[in-house]
Structures are given as C-alpha cells and as structure tokens.
Image (cartoon, rainbow, N blue to C red):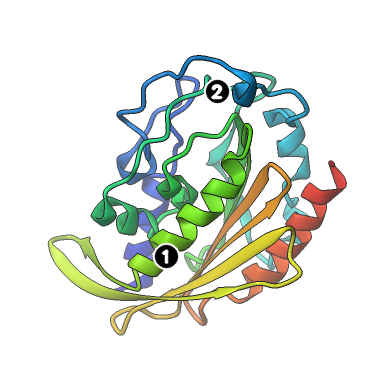
Amino acid sequence: MSQQLRRATLIACSATAVLGLAACGPDNANPSATAAAPGPAASTAGLPDGNKLNALLLPATAMPPKFKLDPSGSQSTGDGAIPPASPSAVPADKACDMLNGTGWVNSAGIIAASFAKNNYADEAQNMFAQELDAYRGNDAQTVMANLKKTLTACHTFTVTQDGQNFSATVTLQSLPGVGDEALQAVITSPEWTGGSTLVAARVGKVVVATYDNEQSNTGTAGVALTKTLVKNAASAH
C-alpha cells in the first residue's frame, strides 16, 4: 500500500461538522447528537473562542522544511460557539476508522464549544495536522478518558481502502509532564511505509490534538511540535 494513497484518504475527509461546515466521512463524529438544554455546565465563560485558538496554532516557520499550509484544512469557529449537544457514543468500528484521519479527536464523541485546526504537508505526502478544542464543564477530561479507551480498544483494527483491507496496530503510551495529562499513539502496518503518531494533551479545558503522518518514520517529530503547541495553550490560561 502506498503512503501517497493513504494520505490522500486522510486529508480528503478532515472537515468538522459544526457551524455549517461540511462533514466528510468518519470525522463527523456525532451525527445523531441532539441539542441539550443549556445549563451551568454549558457555559462558555472563560473559554477561548476560535480566533484565540487559531492564534495559538503553530506557524509555518515551526514546521519541517518544505511543509506548506493546506488551505482546505484550515478551519475554526471564529468568534462564535458551537451549541451544546448531548454526548453521542461512537460505535467501536467507526471510532477505529477515525484514527486514520486528521479529525481523530472526534472519536471521543463529544462536541467542543470552539476549535481551530489546520494541516501542513510536503510534496512527499508527509503531513502534520494540529487542532485545539475548548470544551465546556468537565468535557475535556471526558474526552481524554474516551480517547484512551478508543485507542486501547483499537489496538489492532482494519483499514479499508480501494477495496483492500490492511491490518493496523496502535501502540499507546502516556506522555508525563505534557499539559495536565497527555497520551501518544503510534499507528503502523506491515503494508505501510512509515506510520502515524497521534498525540492528545489536555491543558485545563482545552485539548490539543495532533496527527503526524510520515513515510520515513512513525511521525516522532510531531511529538516535539505538539509539546510546543501545548505550551502555547498553557500560555493562554
């Protein structure tokens, strides 16, 4: 399986289904969510909006050489907020599918109040995607717990592309000292060249999520970039 084919699938479905933005495939993590009645836990008081989160994203100068911004992957909630919605559990098979895409944080099944995200890539089809999500109440803690459960349950899962099935393996570990809590997952397959590294870190009510897809390795450079992004998120508190 070529890495180019794999990345084409990754970025083809990276939109988040909020504020009228078009959803695509598994990144629409909560299609059946119903609006919840606003209450104290639904308040966005003190949360950064999409504009503020967007300003915290790493700039092009922080990216590896030859990486360029993919305009189609740049999205945020701006100065608005996403209406509160009831959590919606994602079926196990769909949750595993989401791990093979830039919107993998949506596999937690909880909608953020605000977010900002973008993707950088080079001509060799290597990619780094970054996202900041601000959550109401205790939702950020729940997101981290749900992501850990999903990554554990998806230790081995099947990726289907062009009618072919490929067996992928997730290696999960914690990242001590990164934000309030953090985890790292490396996804590999015997049929793939290189692999992908997913990192999620919580800083208060903000979850930092990154996806590093590399042909020559498993995306270890993305961990260092994520740590810098976590520091940016911490500076906003």
Q: Tell me the element at label 1.
A: helix
Q: Is residue 194 left or right of residue 134?
A: left
Which corner quadrant holds the N terminus?
bottom left
Crowdedness near tag 1: few (<14), some (14–19) or many (≥20) residues, C-alpha within 10 Å: many
Which of 199/141 is in front?
Answer: 141
Q: Nearer the viewer, residue 214 or 26?
A: 26
Q: Can residue 128 be spotted in the picture?
A: no
* Amino acid of disc 1: Leu
| Residue type, mark 2 in image | Ile
Toward the viewer: 222 or 29? 29
- In the rendered structure, find residue 182 and report the number of the disc placed on it: none
The quadrant holding residue 178 is bottom right
* Residue 119 horizontal/vertical position (percent): 57, 50
Residue 225 lies, with reference to residue 192, above or below; the image says: above
Q: Which one is nearer the viewer's eye here, 4 or 210?
A: 210
Gap in angstroms between the C-alphas marked 1 and 2: 26 Å
Could you tell me if residue 142 is visible in this image? yes
Q: Residues within 10 Å of mark 2 (few under 14, many from 20)?
A: some
Residue positioned 39% across, 55% down in the render? 10
- Return the x and y of residue 117 as percentages of the image width and height: 60, 42
Q: Is residue 88 depicted above or below 183 in this figure? A: above
Q: Which residue is mark 2?
A: 82
**What residue is at 24 percent from the left and 56 percent from the top?**
93
Residue most toward the bottom? Answer: 190
Quadrant of residue 33 within the rendered picture: top left
Residue at coordinates 63% horizontally, 60% vertically from top-left?
67
**Quarter of the image containing the C terminus?**
top right
Q: Is residue 22 above or below residue 37?
A: below
Q: At 52% across and 19% down in the image, what residue appears? A: 83
> What residue is disc 1 on?
151
